[in-house]
Amino acid sequence: MHKRVTEARTSPPENELEAATAMPISALHHPDTLEACVRTALELGEITPFLQAQVDQIAAQPNLSDRHLTILRVLADAIEDGCIRRVSVSEE
């Protein structure tokens, strides 16, 4: 079982699982979650099924802001340019 981090972090999470388990469920719907997902994918050089699901959930929302549309375009461009690769569950 994973322990939830309750103290303030002074460094970024070391991996996606650590980031996801330290994030409260309500934070998944925060407006900056899309940017966080894309930044994580850019840092890792890959987008995992978990991150892709988060992006898809946010992208499906009606009336996305210009900022969110720009972030989605950045992600699409990074995938197209090979800066981010999609990984499957078997590759994780």
Image (cartoon, grey):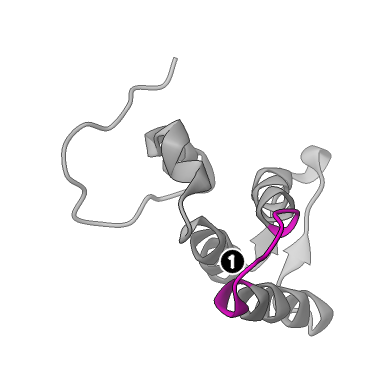
Above or below, 8 against 6 in this view is below
Name the spot of residue 82 as percent of width and height, x first: 78, 79
Tag 1 secondary structure: helix
Q: Reply above or below: 72 against 58.
A: below
Find disc 1 in the rendering and name its residue: 38
Image quadrant where one finds the N terminus = top left
> What is the magenta segment's predominant secondary structure?
loop
Would you say residue 84 sits in the magenta stretch? no
x, y percent for residue 24: 40, 34
Q: Is residue 22 above or below residue 49?
A: above
Please give the name of the residue rendered at 67% of the width and 55% of the height, measured from the top-left corner.
Answer: 55
Q: Is residue 63 magenta?
A: yes
Q: Position of residue 85 (x, y in %)?
A: 77, 66
Q: Is residue 66 left or right of residue 73?
A: left
| Left or right: 55 in relation to 29 | right
Q: Is residue 58 above or below residue 42?
A: above
Q: Which residues are magenta?
A: 59-68
- Please report the residue visible at 46 percent of the width from the left and 33 percent of the height from the top: 25
Residue furthest to the front: 63
